[in-house]
Image (spheres, rainbow, N blue to C red):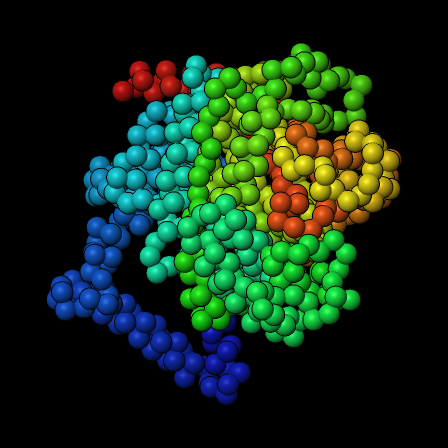
Amino acid sequence: PERKIKEPLRSYANRGLDRDEAIAAVIGGAALVCMLLALLFGLPMLFPGQWPILSPAILTPQKVFEHVLLGEGARLWMESGEVPPGGVGDTARLEQALERYERLLHTFDANNTDALYWRSMILARLGLLEEALEGFDRSLNVRAEHAVMFAKARLLFELGAGRPHEEIYLVKAFDIMSTWFGATQNLPGLVSASPRSLGSMKLPATTKSRLRHDLQQMQHLADLGVKGAEEGAEAYLRVLTELQPKEIVHLKGGVQWKSPAEEAPGVGGTLGERIGLDTNERHQHDTVRLTKTQLKTLQPFINKAFHFHPPAQLEGGVLNPLLDLRQIEADWADPTKQMKAIYIDDMLRPKALASLLQFCEESTIFNAVKKRGYLCSFMDYGFAAPLVAQLAVELRQALPSIFCGHALSMVWAYKYDDTHSDGIGLHADMAAVNVNCWPVSDSHRLDGAQDTGARTDPPGAVEGRGGLVVWPQHAPANWSFPQYNLIGEEAPLDTEVKAFRDELFRTQNTSALTIPHRTNRCVIFDSSLFHSTDKIKFARGYRSRRINLTLLYGRMHETCRDVDKRKWMWAQYKSKHSSNK
């Protein structure tokens, strides 16, 4: 366009060049760029093997065509739009994108992992789930990649939803994630980066509260006789001591505060409960950067599957057999309720509860660090166990009117700091149904409240409680994930989101539902509802840390009828696809 030609001319004019000189300079620059491009593409093909840095495999005409087809497929995928409730998006665009990827695979490279991955993603969107699964397997046979493994696990969730023996699909999916976690976290000589997670830190950035957690956990494992845990505790102790030399003095047999007066109430006598504490507890979550020497010291332990034992399924089931399941479903469907949010006490059998708690306390899977003072373990980075799969399936089967056809989409566990944690801020999650369960004993709560029932008075009216606050407002359907998931963060918000949040907080005294923490209590609610952690006030010590288990089902804003509609569309498309073959 003429404007793009005139802009560089004006730039040269501003430097005192006349028009002819400016035109000559632009033409000369363009010629130089063309010559460089000719050398870049031409020399590797004329003299293969002489230019290893320029990698002829990337610059061949075949590779150029492959990248063109990949780019066209990606553009068409984006143009297919967001998946509406009960829909699949623009089918025509998806079919066009599918044609690009299949042309690439058939004509140029049958093992192109990018094309295999995106072809499978499109097939899954269109409901051709078995073909999509085959494509993911082909891609993994060429190269094992996290994105493909994660997508395959999610596809197995969808394949298993509502089928007989659904737990087989979920256990297989979790086995894929567990194998991936164990293999990637224990590579020799590697201090792996923290797992992907919105807002989580990556090494060498971390927090003292995370290091204190790992020290406490190593001490706990050492007490249990786990091999190497004592050395791990010593490594974390050494690094924490270096990070806080002014607050710690060495004594025979351990470390303690400089003077008893500096000890905060509730601090126990074990090393892990004393080491690394700041006078101002909020500073525990400030970012620190580990040196190369410190990383080397922690290398065998930090972000590693040092101790990883996923619990097996339990005979006789996970859910409490005394639950009144029909009453639970009636409470969910109650039209007089302000929002779809219920809680169930004594949800799990004692053995199942103890096994999940032991898994969270002993397995070194909490490697994602959040600045608000809690650690995360996602299913693709450790929180994947046959027992979790069993729980996910039994919930769907026991409460069909709540979970209907919604497939499991994600699971995770959060573990909170034992000195100070603000918990999770206001947000909504990308799912249809959200389940939160609390396995830690209420004996560790310090708020002293006797009432454990839900209430609708202000969330801060009673100090502590440590549960969940749910608002009746839903995340708007046109908002993006960062808008509704980070609405409670201090990050800059656009005008619409900020106004919405301010109104939410203004009306919370009269509308928000606060559900206190209670051992073996599970909260089930519409995942598009805004919610946050209530104030946390638990005792200090490793086993006093609040733990929250989360299971997400389905897609945000989708109803049971929407799920049935999509499955009908999938069946129609599958029939059409089979006849075209």
Q: As rendered, which of 474 and 83 lies closer to the eye?
A: 474
Task: List x then y, in percent, for residue 452.
Answer: 79, 31
Hey, which residue is sitting farthest bottom in the picture? 16
Indicate the quadrant containing the N terminus: top left, top right, bottom left or bottom right.
bottom left
Asked if residue 485 shows in the view, the reply is: no
Indicate the quadrant containing the C terminus: top left, top right, bottom left or bottom right.
top left
Residue placed at 46% from the left, 53% from the top?
Answer: 229
Which of the 4 image quarters holds residue 166? top left
Q: As rendered, which of 462 and 162 lies closer to the eye?
A: 462
Asked if residue 537 shows in the view, the reply is: yes
Which of the 4 image quarters holds residue 474? top right
Residue placed at 64% from the left, 24% from the top?
Answer: 347
Q: As rendered, which of 219 and 78 lies closer to the eye?
A: 219
Residue placed at 61% from the left, 19% from the top?
Answer: 320
Task: List x then y, in percent, for residue 86.
Answer: 55, 24
Residue placed at 24% from the left, 52% from the top?
Answer: 63
How many numbered discs?
A: 0
Q: Is residue 438 left or right of residue 11?
A: right
Q: Is residue 464 above or below residue 289?
A: above
Task: List x then y, in percent, for residue 349.
Answer: 59, 23
